[in-house]
Image (cartoon, grey):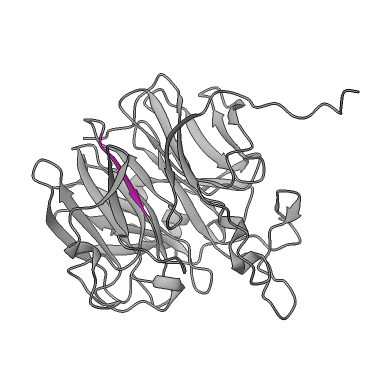
Amino acid sequence: MNGPVGGEPVGELELVHTFTGPMPTGVTVSHTGRVFVNFPKWGDEVPATVVELRGGREVPFPDQRWNSPSGNADAEAFVSVQSVVVDPADRLWVLDTGSPMFQPTEPGGPKLVRVDLDTDTVAQVITFPTDVALTTTYLNDVRFDLRRGDGGVAYVTDSSDSGPNGIIVVDLASGASWRRLHDHPSTKAEPLATFRPVVEGRPFLQRPPDGPPSPVAMGSDGIAISADGTRLYYCPLASRRWYSVATDALADRTVAEAEVAATVVDEGDKGGGSDGLETDDAGRFYLTSYEHNAVLRRRPDGEFETLVHDPRLLWPDTMSVAGDGYLYVTANQLHRQPTYQRGQDLRRRPYALFRTRIDAGPVRLR
């Protein structure tokens, strides 16, 4: 007797690499096809928080010394990295939270580090002052526009689950940085009354071993820049909505905060909770959907479509559009961590890095 019919995958996922150690979050691909991945320190043993995938191996990058911090305030080593992004000039930028296990940050820990890929050496370290990287700040993801100013700007999301959220803007030439949309409603997690996420058939909540569950409170997380660089898109982790803001307002320090906020647009319901956002040079947006094991795509005409849906996409986290015409995406089972499972670790290794063909390239603003 035949059994019931089940759901079917949409699109095609190609397995690039499996991870048998710590869980990955970020991935990025250089202009020449080099693949970099990072592992934040969330409780797993993390021998190196940034690696390059070489011949199927995870090689500490740029070396083991940079992956061996002396403490949480070490400005000359990676403390706990959440994101790695190759910029339009083919340089690797490492976004270091300085916050293992989401601990309060210390000056020197939260930073943006540039590694030149022609020499594989650290060429610039930008640390954040205490009025930019607050003790509660959790630096999450970053995008670049190298056309602005003398050396370009970076936009960083602060996804803190215990303090103000917002966008951090960095002048790459001077290293100066400032907060925008500080504690603005668009950067904050939605309450359970309006957003009740469900992953693998279960409500996605913080579930301590003892005590009642509570809503996930992580704010501005995913970030993407439009193909023309005029708008920055972002979304709280705990929300089905996403927003955009004018980059001219973000990047001009003389513009008042109220004027910046006036340029925010509610882009509507994006079809699921998202951890990652990305764009391509054809003007399309990509949104992970952790509730549906999927990656969605918004076309230039505003219509949404499912790029891939696959049961192996257990918590699609970070995406990277590469020059080879593929979209890369990590799947790390984040929702199965003990934090959300009454102290039980329900993750099952290996974690995975996939890619899927999109026949478009990355946004390179330079």
Q: Which residues are magenta?
A: 34-38
Location of residue 111 in the rendering, given as x and y in whole percent from the top left corner: 26, 64
Determine the residue positioned at 17% across, 47% down. Answer: 149
Q: Main secondary structure of the magenta part?
A: strand
In the picture, measured across the screen, residue 271 lies left or right of residue 282, that is: right
Q: Position of residue 237 (x, y in %)?
A: 56, 55
Q: Quadrant of the N terminus?
A: top right
Instruction: Name the one closer to the observer, 70 or 234.
Output: 70
Q: In x, y percent, where is residue 141? A: 39, 53
Horizontally, is 58 left or right of 297 in the view?
A: left
Furthest residue in direction right, as rendered: 1
* Residue 202 in picture, x, y percent from top left: 75, 54
Residue appearing at x 42%, y 55% in the figure: 260
Residue 39's image quarter?
bottom left
Q: Residue furthest top?
A: 359
Camera sees residue 232: no
| Residue furthest left in the image | 119
Considering every residue shown, the one lying at the far front of the view is 1
Seen at 17% across and 56% down, the residue is 63
Q: Please tell me which residue lies in front, 330 or 344.
A: 344
In the picture, measured across the screen, residue 151 lies left or right of residue 19, that is left
